[in-house]
Image (cartoon, rainbow, N blue to C red):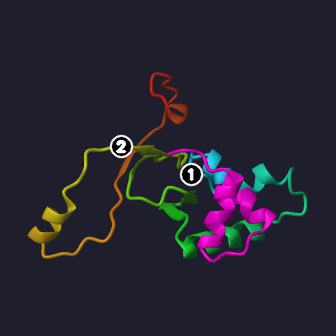
Amino acid sequence: MEELSEIDVISLLKDSGLRVTPQRIAVLTFMDSHREHSTADEIYLSLKQEFPSLSAATVYNTLRAFIEAGIVKELRNGDHASRFDINTSSHHHLVCVQCGLMTDVELPEVPLEKIGREHHFEVSDYHVEIKGVCSACSGNESVVH
């Protein structure tokens, strides 16, 4: 996925019916350039130097507005903090059970229509998580993030 320009970010906000503010531009730009599914606190701490008046509440409220507008997905992983994903298409993740790290992974296409028909179920979305331990937590450098 190609990185969004500031014009693309502004257009995305406007098209989603959201007010364009410097903070919203900064949060969305950060999420687009840091695809590691950051937590709200990670986003806040990363933007705090550039925006000294930015509060954690503003970041949380901005993320809520993005979720409601459908431009960000919230990913919940057990007891770990929620992580946020700018890629709202159906896709899959490797999830570290120790630190909560989430990494996008490509899997073969799932025959959703066939599965739905077989079970008399209309599938609207799906998400696959493959859980394990990342290289940082396991100390195994042969496993790459």
Q: Residue at 36%, 59% (x, y): give it.
A: 127
Q: Nearer the viewer, residue 72 or 130?
A: 72
Q: How many marks?
A: 2
Residue 94's spot in the image, x, y percent?
Answer: 42, 45
Label 1's element? loop
The residue drawn where x is 34% and y is 54% is 128
Which residue is denoted by mark 2 in the rendering? 106
Within 10 Å of disc 1 (Cα), the crowding (few <14, some 14-19, many 20+) is many
Q: Is residue 102 above or below residue 21?
A: above
Identity of the amino acid at label 1? His
State the extent of the magenta-drawn residues as a range: 1-29
How crowded is the residue under tag 2: few (<14 C-alpha within 10 Å), some, or many (20+)? few
Tell me which amino acid carries mark 2. Glu
Counting residues from the start of the chain, the first of labels 2 and 1 encountered is 1
Looking at the picture, how far across and down is residue 36, in whole percent? 57, 46
Extreme-left residue of the structure? 118
Residue positioned 17% across, 69% down in the render: 116
Name the secondary structure under disc 2: loop
Q: Determine if residue 40 is in view.
A: no
Mark 2 or 1, closer to the camera: 2
> From what the image shows, is residue 130 above or below residue 79?
above
Q: Main secondary structure of the magenta part?
A: helix
Q: Is residue 106 left or right of residue 28?
A: left
Residue holding disc 1: 37
Residue occupying the point 55% across, 66% down: 71
89, above or below 4, in the image: below
What is the CA distance from the residue labelled 2 to the residue labelled 1? 16 Å
Residue 126 located within the stretch drawn in magenta: no
Q: Along the line of sight, which residue is nearer the eye, 36 or 66?
A: 66
Residue farthest to the right, as pictured: 52
Q: Is residue 96 left or right of residue 31?
A: left
Question: Splitting the image into 4 quarters, where does residue 133 fall?
Answer: top left
